[in-house]
Amino acid sequence: MEEGVTRIGVSLPGNLLEEFDKIISTRGYSSRSEAIRDAIRNYISEYKWLDKEGGEIVGVINVIYNHHYKGTSDAIISLQHDFGDVITTTMHIHLNEESCLEMIIVKGGMEGIKKLVDRIMTIKGVANVKLITAVRERTL
Ligand code: NI
């Protein structure tokens, strides 16, 4: 075994592993271990910022919601007015008859952005909220 390498055993449901293997085969990984290392690195870089206090980030909050649900659009818009200091711009995409995707580009203090994400999650009619960070404090 390579120096500084730790072996771990992980239990996974069969269908999850099957799906993972299917994807890595289309991406040209030479081994499953290599793909898992990459997946872990991505996971860390996505959530690392949660660990820190203060600091600035740039990212996008993807919000999927049902626009037939009464009050959801209004609540999302009203919240964006409250958090105008960290919101750069917003894009709205009508996904299908009932679902909308709102992409909220954010730049600023991570505490405010975290609060905004938490508030969006509590709005009724919101199906999914995901924050994707593009740039973190060190590279800003
Ligand atoms: Ni729409």
Image: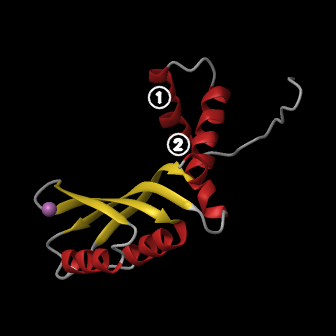
Q: Is residue 26 visible?
A: yes
Q: Image point 16% across, 81% down: which residue?
A: 70
Q: Image point 58% across, 54% down: which residue?
A: 137
Name the quadrant containing residue 8.
Answer: top right
Q: Where is residue 119 in the image (x, y as percent from the top left)?
A: 41, 78
Marks 1 and 2, how far apart in space? Answer: 10 Å
Q: Is the residue 101 above or below the residue 45 in the image?
A: below
Q: Can residue 124 be seen in this view?
A: no
Q: Which element type, helix, strand or loop, lies under badge 2? A: helix
Identify the residue at the far front of this view: 140
* Ligand 1, image quadrant it occupies: bottom left
Q: What residue type is labelled 2?
A: Leu
Looking at the picture, the colour scheme in use is secondary structure
Horizontal side of 52 relative to 14 (left or right) equals: right
Quadrant placement of the N terminus: top right
Name the quadrant containing residue 101.
Answer: bottom left
Q: Position of residue 118 (x, y in %)?
A: 45, 75
Horizontal side of 123 relative to 50 (left or right) equals: left
Horizontal side of 97 relative to 79 (left or right) equals: left
Q: Which element type, helix, strand or loop, lies under badge 1? A: helix
- Between residues 22 and 54, which one lies in front from this camera angle? 54
Name the quadrant containing residue 52.
Answer: bottom right
Q: Where is residue 91 in the image (x, y as percent from the top left)?
A: 22, 57
Q: Position of residue 97 (x, y in %)?
A: 10, 59
- Between residues 112 and 62, which one lies in front from this camera angle? 112
Q: Image point 47% across, 64% down: which residue?
A: 108
Q: Image point 60% across, 30% down: which residue?
A: 35
Label 1, residues with CA under 10 Å away: few <14, some 14-19, many ≥20 = few
Circle on res. 22: 1
Which residue is label 2 attached to?
Answer: 16
Q: Which amino acid does label 1 sit on?
A: Lys
- Between residues 15 and 29, which one lies in front from this camera angle? 29
